[in-house]
Image (cartoon, helix red, strand yellow):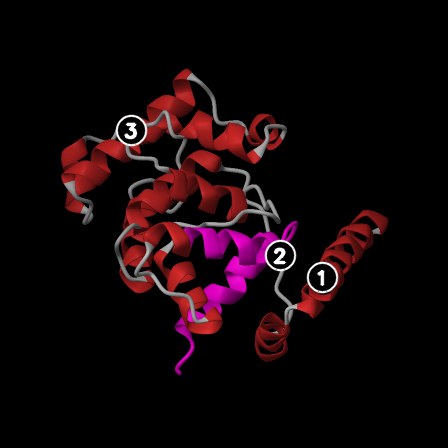
Amino acid sequence: MAGKNSQKNGKELVATTYQTHFEKDKKFVKLIQQQGVLSLSQRKNLCIYLCGSIMSQQLSVKVAAVIYQRFLDLFNGKEPTPEQILSVPLEKLRSIGLSNAKSRYVHNVAQFAIDKGMDWKTLNKMSSEEVIEYLTEIKGVGRWTVEMLLMFALGRPDVFAIDDLGIQNAMIGIYKLSRDDKKKFKEDMIRISSKWSPYRTFACMHLWRWKDQPK
């Protein structure tokens, strides 16, 4: 029981710390007041997380959830091993709604997990940039996809997805930035986000929520 309490207290401490950290940014304080304090969790099955991320790309949340459930249904509703994923023909993956490219990429992730390893404990010891460099060797897995894994599977609190369109649009809306000069736009994003470190993951989460709220 003491372990559970310690874990809970740790999460509460992080939440309080990041909330305090943003107090100097008045615009962000308003976001936190409107949305409440957020928390991070972890997912140990990194292979399945990457496969799910690939499946969801360029799809609505609802459609992505349907396809992912169809994928799990191929394995009686359970998360498959990399070997089980590879045993499913590409034609079968396409039949659940995946494109030719996504079907191949899912196989690529499974093959990489078998050949080089995707153990949670091993990757958790790496720096964020090391994880990005390691996993982007997989064809079909880009930097953005690994950033999402760092945030929502490894639970890293200080990841900033600068190329995410939702993050960009939110910062344009909140901080009145302009995308006309792409170089300056990125520099402005980096300048503003540097003040959020070491809690930039939480900042991204709040920005995504702001983007999805009716204006």
Image coords of residue 158 (percent x, y): 60, 47
Q: Earlier in the sequence, mark 2 or mark 3?
A: 3
Q: Secondary structure at mark 3?
A: loop
Q: Earlier in the sequence, mark 1 or mark 3?
A: 1
Span highlighted in magenta in the image: 186-215
Q: Residue at x 62, y 49 (%)?
A: 157
Image coords of residue 160 (percent x, y): 51, 49
> Was residue 24 drawn as part of the magenta stretch in this picture?
no
| Callouts 1 and 2 close, C-beta under 8 Å | yes
Q: Amino acid at mark 3?
A: Lys
Work out how far the residue at label 2 is from the one at label 3, CA to CA, in angstroms. Answer: 32 Å
Q: Which numbered disc covers residue 10?
A: none
Q: Is residue 213 above or below residue 192?
A: below
From the image, tell me which residue sits under label 1: 21
Instruction: Rate crowding at label 2 as few (under 14), some (14 to 19) or many (20 or more) other CA atoms within 10 Å.
Output: many
From the image, tell me which residue sits under label 2: 196
Q: Is residue 105 left or right of residue 195?
A: left
Work out how far the residue at label 1 is from the one at label 2, CA to CA, in angstroms. Answer: 7 Å
From the image, tell me which residue sits under label 3: 139
